[in-house]
Image (spheres, coloured by chain):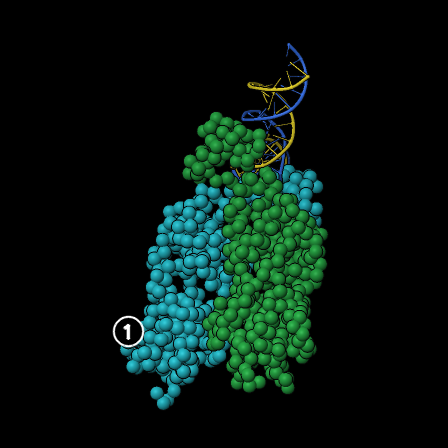
Chain colours: A green, B cyan, C blue, D yellow
Amino acid sequence: MSNSSLKSIAKKLSLSESTVSRALNDYKDISLSTKKLVNETVVELGYQPNIFARRLASGNPECLGFVIPWRDGQLNDPFLGELMTGMSTALTKIGWDLTVLVAKSFENEVELFKKLSMSKNLSGLIISRTLRNDERFKILKDLKIPFVAHGRSINCSTSSWLDVDNESAFFDMTKHFISLGHRKIAHICGPNVYNFSIQRIEGWKKALMKSGIQIKSEFLQVADLSFDGGKIAMDKLLKLKDLPTAVSCVSDTVAMGAMQSMRNHNLSPGKEISLMGYDGLELGAWIDPPLSTMTQPIQTVGKNLAEMLVNLVDGKKKPSDLQKLVRANILRRATDNSPMTTS
Amino acid sequence: MSNSSLKSIAKKLSLSESTVSRALNDYKDISLSTKKLVNETVVELGYQPNIFARRLASGNPECLGFVIPWRDGQLNDPFLGELMTGMSTALTKIGWDLTVLVAKSFENEVELFKKLSMSKNLSGLIISRTLRNDERFKILKDLKIPFVAHGRSINCSTSSWLDVDNESAFFDMTKHFISLGHRKIAHICGPNVYNFSIQRIEGWKKALMKSGIQIKSEFLQVADLSFDGGKIAMDKLLKLKDLPTAVSCVSDTVAMGAMQSMRNHNLSPGKEISLMGYDGLELGAWIDPPLSTMTQPIQTVGKNLAEMLVNLVDGKKKPSDLQKLVRANILRRATDNSPMTTS
DNA sequence: TTTGACTCCGAAAGCGTTTTCGTCAAAAAT
DNA sequence: ATTTTTGACGAAAACGCTTTCGGAGTCAAA
């Protein structure tokens, strides 16, 4: 049963434990024939290595940590499950584990990092919710903890990260509005502590410029990344004498707040004013009218994050060689339409 | 730095490693004075035990697994993050870890269990999304894997579980409708493979009976646990000659589908027909009108689940002694009102 | 025949804890 | 004064694996 160890396999095959171990770890000084033998008896006995013994002996924890993005007692990441599913599936494939960590504040998180750097319990870390100027990059580098970030930062050129191409996404979104005939396109952006806020603004701007549309500063409203934030921002937009005909929102949540604001002003989203969110939240399809948005393949992202970190830990790659940009795709539902001719 | 081990502490204090170890583990054959000394040098040197060595030697993985409820390629648990945060905080307090597992199908999950029972990598398991007749209870018991379930099942009397008091919740919800003046109260329930579906129906029924309201079978509609499911169920309800004035929905998602259906029939949720959801999804506040619902303290639930399992693993309690019911609370937003007098 | 290279494997020393058992002095009981 | 008990600690064997090193055997080249 569970009492199958290296020893039992060795005894059964009249080999030494070390040979069996090296056979399993695919050392090149073991003949193919014995490797085959060993592998056969492994399945026969249902052998499962004791990972703690292995990790103790090898010094490799074979275990990745994911820092749950928890801030201000608020946690609103509908993707968390899918992201972690992606990570976990990638890791179980190679026998590694994924353990979760929570940091309730920035200080708490730094403290966590320090502890981790002492107790070498984790091979590496995956962090998310990166800020525009995220100190964690430097801290982790100084502590020599291998990590990959979900999202970029100003000072991430020598680190490993995976991010959505925010600029392209909002470039595409804005272009899409333009192709629908819109000229007056506003953007509700997020707080500029987040790097993606800046990038998304950039995408919006570039699309307008490329089409020769002048950028009006009052068409750019910054909002908290929340329902209320979106509502307030749209309220301001609706106070303008010259209203936009389309609004690109930094997130679905914000877009839903914006829709609320429109309803309060007796405007129908997708009619007088088109709008799009970003994130591809499923619940966007549940409201009336269903919210157009942009999606990214979250699960693949999780898988990639894990694989990148493994490569980093194994020393196969340098951090700066592990940087990846994924693209988001437009998901049309009902709030992106051509402008009303009457306007 | 990180090279502080038991040995370094022992050397510094001229003690043996074993004494230091036992001092740290609070053995009673160590004098208080040396315990104090040891603890002081521990903080001085910033000692962090090597958990792999400890786990290997002690035979206790000190590590709990959480099976991510993944089914049919669908994962829609907005609570996942909060739940896991609760678990993780409870565990880090005692130096244990939380690792996540994903099972993409039932067979996959059973296979996972079997592997786990051989390789003693995990001290125990937390499972969720329990079915009315959930085979996992028996399987895990047979494999002698300690576990606690988030949610009950038919055959869970000898197991450890934590669940919301679904019956009370829907009893309360229905009573609430009644106190608002409603008499014609329908219920959209979930598929009866889920235990909570049955329990929620029960709560609804009992409240009606207690108030002497006759239960009309056409007022009970079963729906898939999805937006579309809710929409379809409400469509059926609206075909009735004698319409209900209130509808209690098995989940917020379903309730939102029901709202969609009402809009399609030119009815305003909370006006002609009141309705309530269940889960306390934040997004329920983002729609128009905001959805009334019921909430539970998810993070506390996560914490409890972890603590229960630890007690189970430590052998301090029997599974049947670890069963806990938590209550859900009404969260009034805008869709629960008194019936219209005209009707 | 010697030398060298190459292939394959075993011996053994770790990895850093825990835990059992034995020891020895001092305190308590006889 | 002798025995028994108690308190406090050290020695040492695990736990199950990895990894380095060396050695035996084979084969071809010198």
Q: Which residue is mark 1?
A: B217
Residue B83 visible at all: no
Along the line of sight, the residue nearer the viewer: A44 or A315:
A315
Residue A111 visible at all: yes
Residue at x-position 62% and y-position 74%: A187
Along the line of sight, the residue nearer the viewer: B99 or B55:
B99
Task: Where is residue A285? Give x, y as percent.
Answer: 47, 71
Query: Three-letter amino acid code at disc 1?
Result: Ser
Helix, strand or loop at label 1? It is: helix
Q: Is residue A187 above or below residue B127?
A: below
Badge 1 density bin: few <14, some 14–19, many ≥20, Cα 10 Å: few
Residue at x-position 47% and y-position 80%: B289
Residue A45, picture quadrant: top left
Task: Where is residue B250? Give x, y as percent.
Answer: 39, 70
- Total of numbered circles in the picture? 1
Along the line of sight, the residue nearer the viewer: B336 or A173:
A173
Task: Where is residue B161? Give x, y as percent.
Answer: 42, 58
Label 1 chain ID = B
In the drawing, does residue A139 fall left or right of residue A12?
Answer: right
Quarter of the C terminus of chain B within the rendering: bottom left
In the drawing, does residue B45 fall left or right of residue A41?
Answer: right
Residue at x-position 51% and y-position 55%: A85
Task: Where is residue B91? Give x, y as percent.
Answer: 54, 55
